[in-house]
């Protein structure tokens, strides 16, 4: 349980951040828990490690009390951290940081947040292992793949850089034991729409479709979807991404990542403050 504070300085580290709804969420959490504080956006473009480290050192000095981490820094911050939760160590990416007696800790709340929202949208179907196709091989894809493997799924990872997908699968296999039947294999990006046997779930863990490039999609415009597949897009801004439009036009059940954002944020907030906000009462759409 973290020590109570009179004021909580919280924030989000990433780039770009103009689309982020995290400040709105966490300010709502502060009000629900009756806590004083702020949640700021810390934009650090790629290629500026000195700025990244400066924010982490402010966290170590407890000038900042909690940081979320998003694209593109979920793996880039790892060298400056001292300790990891078991899930974060296995995933090899973090989204929640805090300091404890001068040591920087990293956790990953994306994995449980994703599973929570997947089951909220797709019900009992999502509680049973199926075949999934994860698009992307960055920090978010690592968390999603880890969560599915821990639930016993067969996961295929397609990335524009094939070596990155292969590394992801190899790392998760080496870092944690998974239930019998769980499997992770890489796939060339060009073959994502022709995978056999076809996936039951397609997850977009790339930034394709995110504002301001809302016209983009990770799914080829001329390609058919597997019949009866579910589609989950981690992108939540815009609420109706190009991928979701494609999936719904094909008659498929589909959901964006807003609920995952809420769930992972609530878990991070509890880590920092000890207060668990009532996420079930939060709006489920941007």
Image (cartoon, rainbow, N blue to C red):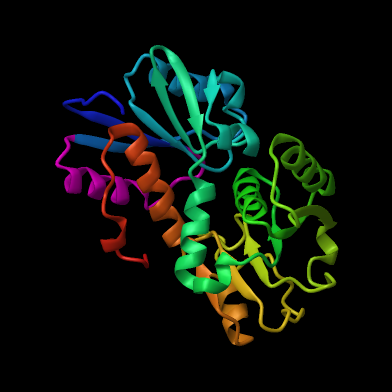
Could you say where residue 167 lies in the image, as x and y percent from the top left?
Answer: 79, 40
Residue 15 magenta:
yes
Quarter of the image where one finds residue 62 = top left
Tell me which residue sits at (56%, 68%) in the image.
126
Residues shaded magenta:
14-36
Vertical arrangement, residue 132 with respect to residue 148, above or below: below
User: Vertically, is 82 above or below 286?
Assistant: above
Of 43 and 59, the residue lying toward us? 59
38, 131: nearer the viewer: 131
User: Number of numbered discs present?
Assistant: 0
Tell whether 102 sits left or right of 199.
left
Per the image, is 33 magenta? yes
The quarter of the rendered structure image containing the N terminus is: top left
Residue for point 31% across, 51% down: 25
Tell me if residue 58 can be seen.
yes
120 displayed left or right of 231: left
| Residue 198, percent from left and from top | 78, 74
Nearer to me, 236 or 261:
261
- Pick the quarter of the image with the C terminus: bottom left
Q: Residue at x 77, y 54 (%)?
A: 183
Q: Which one is in front, 191 or 278?
A: 278
Whether residue 240 appears in this view of the structure is: no
The image shows residue 243 at horizontal and vertical percentages of 61, 71
């Amino acid at each position: 349980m973290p020590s109570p504070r009179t004021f909580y300085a919280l924030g989000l580290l990433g780039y770009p951040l103009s689309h982020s709804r995290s400040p709105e969420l966490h300010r709502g959490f502060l009000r629900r828990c009756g806590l004083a504080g702020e949640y700021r956006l810390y934009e650090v473009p790629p290629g500026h490690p000195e700025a990244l480290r400066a924010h982490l050192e402010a966290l170590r000095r407890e000038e900042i009390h909690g940081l979320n981490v998003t694209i593109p820094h979920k793996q880039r911050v790892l060298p400056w951290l001292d300790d990891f939760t078991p899930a974060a160590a296995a995933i090899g990416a973090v989204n929640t940081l805090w300091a404890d007696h001068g040591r920087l800790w990293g956790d990953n709340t994306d994995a449980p947040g994703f599973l929570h929202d997947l089951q909220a949208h797709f019900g009992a179907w999502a509680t049973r292992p199926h075949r999934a196709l994860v698009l992307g091989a960055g920090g978010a894809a690592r968390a999603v793949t880890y969560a599915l493997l821990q639930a016993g799924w067969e996961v295929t990872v397609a990335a524009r850089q094939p070596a990155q997908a292969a590394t992801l699968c190899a790392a998760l296999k080496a870092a944690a034991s998974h239930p019998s039947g769980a499997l992770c294999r890489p796939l060339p990006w060009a073959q994502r729409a022709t995978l056999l046997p076809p996936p039951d779930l397609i997850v977009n863990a790339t930034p394709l479709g995110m504002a301001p490039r809302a016209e983009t999609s990770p799914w080829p415009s001329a390609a058919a979807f597997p019949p009866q597949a579910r589609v989950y897009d981690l992108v939540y801004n815009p609420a109706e991404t190009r991928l979701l439009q494609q999936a719904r036009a094909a008659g498929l059940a589909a959901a964006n990542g807003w609920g995952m954002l809420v769930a992972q944020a609530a878990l991070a907030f509890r880590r920092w403050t000890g207060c668990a906000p009532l996420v079930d009462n939060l709006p489920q759409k941007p």
